[in-house]
Image: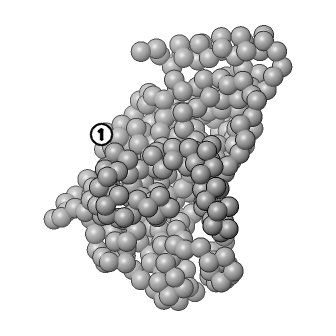
Amino acid sequence: MLSFADRKADLAQAIAAESARGATPLGLKKNTSNLFRDRAESPKRKLDVSAFHHVLGVDTQQRSVNVEGMTPYDALAAATLAEGVMPCVVPQLKSITIGGAVAGVGIESSSFRYGLVHDTLLELEVLLGDGSVVVARPDNEYSDLFFGFPNSYGTLGYALRVKTRTIPVKPYVQLTHIRHSDAAVYFRELDKWCATPDVDFVDGSVFGTDRLYITLGRFVDEAAQVSDYTYRNIYYRSIAEREIDFLATEAYLWRWDTDWFWCSKNLGAQNPLLRRVLGRKRLNSRFYTKVMRWNSRWRLTHAWDRFSKLHRESVIQDVDVPLEHAAGFLDFFVREIGILPIWICPIGNWNP
């Protein structure tokens, strides 16, 4: 296997070769994407960065992991969990890459304590538009790039390597689901739980104006019985059905992936018969993304919309709302937009 340095050298040669061919815009050729908008393919030449998908090292003493930008989080989580740690924030879907989470938005139920993925960074090695590669840290000459890179969506460069913080884990996560029926009380309680030191994960799910759930997660060493939401059982349904639940830590990280939160219903994949036909290997975000891309290319649902004269559109959107305005926004959203369920993910400001 080529080393990281060798892969960088090969990439530099590829950039030089492409630059010599002319001024046509140059884009990145990647195997994964978590952009959900339909859009036409651009005429850009593509630079292949798919080789940058390796975990380079886990340092349990310094609590950090060194990883290449195209590494998906399921591979990153597996490598770190094997060492008894995990990245501070592990986004919800297995196919999300760490480079994408840094350049875009990466959140999860540990974000109440650790913020966004980019808040946990120690170092970035970035491919710039001119083909050069620089190492950006908060205290070196490229500190502006380090702090400006998050949420830049590829406009400043591409993260070939990321060094980020980790936290220790235990084998299991105990979940406690708490129901509320009043939005104002719900968000006040959510704020209180976020300030509770013995809680490791906090998120929420809204199924209606009087069915609002806070889910608390705590690392534990033992579990008498562990749930499985990778096949027949559906995680989001369990929130209203169980007050207490236990998951293996890795299964907890991917609790949303099997049904892409609740979006699997758009494919009929919550039907028990179809679920058996699909099997475990196809019940995941990667498969759903492939189906969406296939549908976008062949426009089958568009043909059905024209036939039925009823247009349905899948909406996947993150909305950042200050906590003090969350209850009012939720009331407006349910009344005027009416899309349910809704995932609630509190985000704190972490200063390590």
Residue pictured at 44% horizontal, 78% vertical: 213
What colour scheme does the image use? one colour
Q: Position of residue 80 (x, y in %)?
A: 37, 40
Classify residue 133 as left or right of residue 3: right
In this picture, is 187 found above or below 283? Answer: below
| Residue annotated with mark 1 | 82
Q: Position of residue 37 (x, y in %)?
A: 66, 51
Viewer-closest of 132 and 137 = 132
**Alpha-carbon neighbours of circle 1 within 10 Å: few (<14), some, or many (≥20)?**
few
SS under mark 1: loop
Viewer-closest of 128 and 122 = 128
Residue pictured at 71% horizontal, 29% vertical: 27
Look at the image and tell me whether residue 194 can be seen. no
Classify residue 237 as left or right of residue 209: left
Circle count:
1
Q: Position of residue 223 (x, y in %)?
A: 19, 62
> On the image, which quarter does residue 216 sit in?
bottom left
Residue pictured at 64% horizontal, 62% vertical: 307
Farthest residue, direction left: 224
Residue pictured at 62% horizontal, 33% vertical: 159
Q: Position of residue 260 (x, y in %)?
A: 46, 57
Viewer-closest of 166 and 182 = 182
Classify residue 171 as left or right of residue 315: left
Look at the image and tell me whether residue 246 can be seen. yes
Classify residue 22 as left or right of residue 134: right
In this picture, is 192 found above or below 320? Answer: below
Query: What's the amino acid at mark 1?
Result: Ala
